[in-house]
């Protein structure tokens, strides 16, 4: 009998103790600390913790849900008060009065409780937490994000880090089955597209078109859970600076958008590069006219200042220096990502907090009765129960 009692107590601790939840905070705390201290932290560790946590919460949710319709939900052995009061009346009489107030008693009549919405609040709390854990784990395992710069031309696979740069994918992301991405047209800023736009197409491996759309900063295109975002245009201008028969500078200059246009120019770049460390300066671009304004110095002295046009005067001599604008590549900076289930996560969070508020606002109403020689001894939990017991003692 003692063995069964211990088993019952352990089961109740497993399903009801709030302290067991703290065990699952150890791994997140370690991950946060590890990131701050620059330790190697595996995301799989956090995922494993969340999956085990979800199973644990699922079992608790089932426990609470099954007891929702029961008269006795908490049980006599769950957190009984240490003190009570003596009443000069038999427990059967006190029990009858409490029953009329809505209390339900166990078979032996020694313990009773009143159904309350707080218990439902706890159930909702665990339900919301389970939704958060399941949706979060699903999003992590199906996570997909890639950032790349693409120009008009051949379609690019979305499963290759070599072609598209920064790349992240969960082990259930299904990257090899993703379509090819092709830039069909690049639209420079105009009245319709103030920050420019890019026409894209999604293709199968055999080049069959699946979908097409136009993306612009703040206006993504969505296809089968994937979001295609254009962040900006980036240009690479080939600039060459010669000094006599020698090359002082020869490199592509990366040009990024200016926050505020500088005259007719809307992109800016720097000539600074390790290969030609003596040459420094700034380059401005007017993408509509394919026009550069270059201010270059060599060893701290002025080398070239002037305008070059790709489709016009693209080679100019100044003193002993000769500058040329030999090419311009235009790239669309595109981020492809699988959207998270934000509405599901928001729903889970709302249910979690609603359940927590209900549980805090509505406390359990419970009573323990024990016969004594002159009446009965009563222990009570809950303000309303204490009031009822006090009224019963005054009669």
Image (cartoon, rainbow, N blue to C red):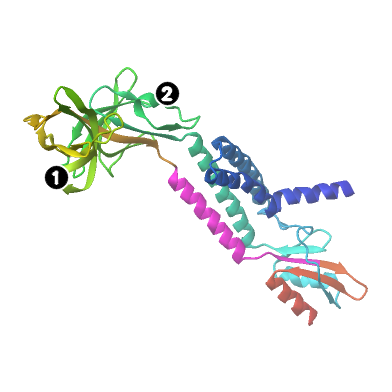
Per the picture, the main secondary structure of the magenta-coloured stretch is: helix
Residue depicted at 62% across the width and 56% down the height:
122
Left/right of residue 39 with respect to residue 305 in the rendered view: right
Query: Residue 304: image x %, image y %?
Result: 13, 36
Q: Is residue 367 magenta?
A: yes
Query: Residue 303: image x %, image y %?
Result: 15, 36
Left/right of residue 376 with respect to residue 136 in the rendered view: right
Q: Secondary structure at mark 1?
A: loop
Residue depicted at 82% across the width and 63% down the height:
109
Q: Is residue 226 visible?
A: no
Query: Residue 135: image x %, image y %?
Result: 51, 42
Disc 1 to disc 2: CB gap under 8 Å: no
44 up-or-down from 70: above or below? above
Q: Marks 1/2: CA distance?
A: 39 Å
Residue depicted at 73% across the width and 73% down the height:
386
Find the magenta span and give its range.
341-368
């Amino acid at each position: 009998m003692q063995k069964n009692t211990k088993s019952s107590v352990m089961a109740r601790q497993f399903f009801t103790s709030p302290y067991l939840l703290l065990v699952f905070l150890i791994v997140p705390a370690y991950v946060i600390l590890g990131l701050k201290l620059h330790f190697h932290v595996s995301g799989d560790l956090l995922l494993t913790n969340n999956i085990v946590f979800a199973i644990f919460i699922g079992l608790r949710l089932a426990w609470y849900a099954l007891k929702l319709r029961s008269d006795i939900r908490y049980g006599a052995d769950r957190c009984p008060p240490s003190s009570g009061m003596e009443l000069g009346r038999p427990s059967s009489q006190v029990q009858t009065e409490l029953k009329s107030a809505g209390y339900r008693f166990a078979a032996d009549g020694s313990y009773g409780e009143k159904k309350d919405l707080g218990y439902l609040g706890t159930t909702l709390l665990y339900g919301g937490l389970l939704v958060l854990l399941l949706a979060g784990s699903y999003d992590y395992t199906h996570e997909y994000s890639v950032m790349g710069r693409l120009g008009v031309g051949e379609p690019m696979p979305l499963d290759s880090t070599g072609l598209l740069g920064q790349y992240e994918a969960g082990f259930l992301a299904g990257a090899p089955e993703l379509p090819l991405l092709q830039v069909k047209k690049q639209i420079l800023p105009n009245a319709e597209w103030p920050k420019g736009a890019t026409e894209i197409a999604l293709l199968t491996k055999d080049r069959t078109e699946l979908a097409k759309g136009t993306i612009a900063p703040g206006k993504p295109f969505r296809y089968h859970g994937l979001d295609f975002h254009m962040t900006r245009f980036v240009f690479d201008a080939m600039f060459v600076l010669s000094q006599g028969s020698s090359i002082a500078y020869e490199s592509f200059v990366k040009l990024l958008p200016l926050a505020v246009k500088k005259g007719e120019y809307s992109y800016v770049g720097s000539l600074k590069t390790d290969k030609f460390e003596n040459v420094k300066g700034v380059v401005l671009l007017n993408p509509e006219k394919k026009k550069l304004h270059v201010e270059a110095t060599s060893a701290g002295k002025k080398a070239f200042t002037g305008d070059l046009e790709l489709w016009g005067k693209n080679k100019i001599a100044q003193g002993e220096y000769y500058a040329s604008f030999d090419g311009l590549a235009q790239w669309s900076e595109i981020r492809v990502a699988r959207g998270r289930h934000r509405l599901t996560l928001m729903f889970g969070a709302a249910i979690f907090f609603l359940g927590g508020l209900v549980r805090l606002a509505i406390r359990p109403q419970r009573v323990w009765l024990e016969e004594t020689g002159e009446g009965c001894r009563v222990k009570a939990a809950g303000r309303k129960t204490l009031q009822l017991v006090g009224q019963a003692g005054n009669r």
